[in-house]
Image (cartoon, rainbow, N blue to C red):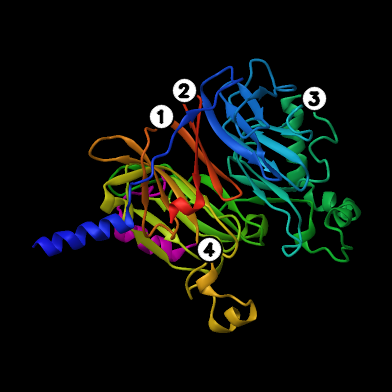
Amino acid sequence: MVILLAVIAFVYAKNYTTNNTLVWEQSNAGLTTLSVNTVTVDTSNQSILYAGTDTGIFKSIDKGTNWTAVNSGLPNPLPAIRKIIHAPFSKAIFALGWGDLFESRDGGNNWTLVGVNIDDIALKPNSTDAGSGEKIYILKDTLTSTQTPIIYSISTGIGFFTEPQQENRTEINSFYEYLYKDQNEINKNNREEASKLLGKIIENDDTSYDVVNVTKIDFLKQKEELPNGARYLGESITSLLSQNSYFTWLQTDRAVYFCWENFQNCEEDNSLQSTLEKETKNLRPLGDAITSYSQIGVPHIYTNLGYGSSKLLINTCLNRGGHWIVNNSLEELGFWPTHLFVYSHYDNINSSDCYDEAEKEKYKIDERAILEDVIFAVARDKKSSSNFLLASKDNAKTWKILKGNLPMPIKSLFVSEIGNWYNIYITTTDNGIFKASIYLKDLK
């Protein structure tokens, strides 16, 4: 019995060591509000950060030590900003509020309203292999009276949002209708501009090279009455997922769809549906799910089964139709995640699910040298209701619990890497921004 207990203690200590303590420091100098929704990094200079708050946008040039308001061009009163994306190829920044989308082309010094009634945005990084350059994907759910979700795929480097300059919200809506109705003519008239943007001569009408592409998402399940008398409110898009490749993914409250570029020809992932049917009877199994995924290398996605669920659904090879795995590692530890962030390295694979032997030889893939995803999770201890930061360096197989009192309530989690250090930022509802750092070797 003593030997058995010793073995259990050894295994637990080996997989889930808690001998690291993070020191969380407030990073609020210069902020005029402590209600911070999101933080993101300038991907070309990771010392530069942008914070979206309940009253506008702030910028830091020293890794979050000091902040300066950058709100020129934003309306008064200042809007709440819930998502910020940096587009490094075009040197543009997009900031999404609750419906309004703003763009800055000078490092946040000046902002222009470029969208209204916008639900989500995502960036496809510049990639010569993918052939279409950097794009901003914009989900607009209320075009005219159709109420059908529409995704706009727009090349970031051609100034569509500033020429012509829209004067008011009505004209901006009309501009999006113009893009929707006349996309073919727009692309035909901008072939030369697209050629310059991509650095190549375009000789045909391949839509991969279009500077604007509009896709109506008309395949989602509609409202209906169920046999038991309950009303099913229909399927809703929760997020757009993109990568530096031809592939995109569409997540709804009940499914994940695999799509080609510009969210075209989407197909429901039947293997996910089969897994969900086994795990839950909820009609909206992903309705309150938290999701994060690697955006470089081979894309892996991590999501849970909604609010309060400890189980993770993991697909390690999204673009190759990899299978979904139900991961119980957090459940076994007694935690349920409230926020996830995947910090990935190139070629994030570690199994033959992604490549066959011929491909491994062709691409010179050595599994022993491949780095896996590093996953950070803010998770709540079910017994104490305390928040902890956990980290996994092996695709959520095992976790290290990092000691240190986390602030509450938490709005978002963001991680950047400089050298061999991970800088971890947590935003809160009324205590501003907290920052901690951990050395990469400390996760091993």
Q: Judge whether 373 appears above or below 391 on screen.
A: below
Q: Which is more toward the observer, 236 or 279?
A: 279
Q: Quadrant of the C terminus?
A: bottom left
Q: Which residue is mark 3?
A: 167
Q: Where is residue 403 drawn, in percent x and y?
A: 36, 40
Per the image, label 2 sits on a secondary structure element best described as: loop
Is residue 85 in view? yes
Q: Which residue is mark 1?
A: 407
* Crowd rating for badge 3 (residues with CA inside 10 Å; few <14, some 14–19, many 20+): few
Q: Which is more toward the observer, 7 or 336?
A: 7
Query: Number of marks in the image?
Result: 4
Given contact means CB atoms under 8 Å apart, are the residues at marks 1 and 3 in contact? no
* Crowd rating for badge 1 (residues with CA inside 10 Å; few <14, some 14–19, many 20+): many
- Specify the quadrant of the image occupied by residue 102: top right
Q: Quadrant of the N terminus?
A: bottom left
Q: Where is residue 420 drawn, in percent x and y?
A: 57, 50
Q: Nearer the viewer, mark 4 or mark 2?
A: 4
Distance of mark 1 from mark 4, alpha carbons? 31 Å
Q: Nearer the viewer, mark 3 or mark 2?
A: 2
* Badge 4 amino acid: Leu
Q: Write the residue at 81% across / 46% down.
A: 157
* Badge 1 amino acid: Pro
Given contact means CB atoms under 8 Å apart, are the residues at marks 1 and 2 in contact? yes
Q: Judge whether 174 appears above or below 355 on screen.
A: above
User: What segment is highlighted magenta in the picture?
Assistant: 267-289
Q: Which residue is mark 4?
A: 371
Q: Which residue is mark 2?
A: 431
Q: Write the residue at 87% across / 62% down.
A: 200
